[in-house]
Amino acid sequence: MMSIGQVSEQTGLSIHTLRYYEQIGLVTPVTRRENGHRTYSQEDVEQINFVLCLKKGGMPITDIKRYIELMQQGDDTVADRLNILRAHEAVVEQQMQELGKHLSFIRWKIDYYCEYHRNQLEQASTET
Amino acid sequence: MMSIGQVSEQTGLSIHTLRYYEQIGLVTPVTRRENGHRTYSQEDVEQINFVLCLKKGGMPITDIKRYIELMQQGDDTVADRLNILRAHEAVVEQQMQELGKHLSFIRWKIDYYCEYHRNQLEQASTET
DNA sequence: ATAAAACCTGGAGTCGACTCTATGTCAAGC
DNA sequence: GCTTGACATAGAGTCGACTCCAGGTTTTAT
């Protein structure tokens, strides 16, 4: 069991954000100690990481929230969740493809500028 | 030479957004016809696509703006621009790696749910 | 010549996702 | 016993990135 501070450290999310996510229903509310402090189980942390996984893939918070709600409704929603995951899979695949194209374009530009810069320096030195 | 509407079609950006980008200096102002309408050269469109390339890689608008400003200042800034591009290259590489991990996690989850769902259906049919 | 379509400007409004403020409780150490 | 630090809540504020609105001009088609 971990405190909110420890979870913040581990996930990279701020304490504020962790509470905010719980408040808006992006993650299921965690149990509390007698003093009211949140205490996170390993499962809770895994759910947070899953949410982050979807988020990094570009899924907006409202959609993630819908997914989490389906999870909470139990096994009857497995088919729906499967559909969402499949759609998201496709989105991420396309994103990676695009990123790959962008990356090679940037590399091409870097090479070009490298060359250009080298010539610049050379010219400066012969002008002495 | 293209009109703003045509560029909007081609880039996927709304007309609003194209004007907004020009206004905040994210792209260099294009020339106008006598009636004041914007007219985009091939180069202008290429610059917009380059900006989108950086943006899709997660670079915030203010940073892209700084890059464009360097471009406008001429050849003395090539070294600076190279640094920015190299840093961005690293960022995009890391992003792709992360996305790859997320993707395989999602796929794993899909497989898991698929199996689960198959069993669900089977059970339902034998219960008849 | 009149309506419709495509463009213009300046400025206000929206939206998603945090992030911070004010105020308060509780436990532990000096 | 009093301060310090980690936690709590409710609600306001911020920030990036658009997006829309009001009001106006110009070209195109009927």
Image (tube, coloured by chain):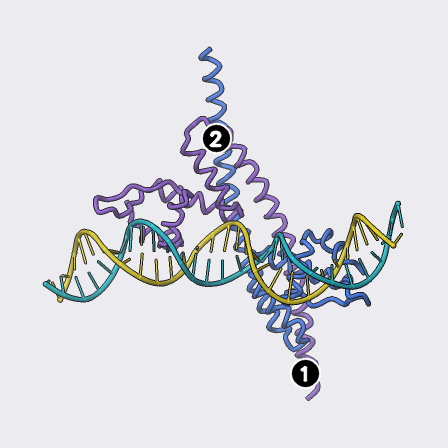
Chain colours: A purple, B blue, C yellow, D cyan
Q: Which part of the image, by quadrant, shows the C terminus of chain A?
A: bottom right
Q: Amino acid at mark 1?
A: Ala
Quadrant where the N terminus of chain A lies?
top left
Question: What's under tag 2, amino acid-wise?
Answer: Tyr
Q: Nearer the viewer, residue B24 or A99?
A: B24
**Residue topped by disc 2:** B113
Q: Are marks 2 and 1 in contact (CB under 8 Å)?
A: no
Name the quadrant containing residue B29: bottom right
How far apart marks 2 and 1 lie (CA) works out to: 64 Å
Q: Is residue B98 above or below residue B47?
A: above
Between circles 2 and 1, the one closer to the viewer is: 2
Q: Chain of mark 1?
A: A
Looking at the rendered structure, which numbered label has been put on residue A124? 1
In this rendering, do the residues under marks 2 and 1 share a single chain?
no
Tell which subunit mark 2 falls on.
B
Q: Residues within 10 Å of mark 2 (few under 14, many from 20)?
A: some
Residue situated furthest bottom in the rendering? A128
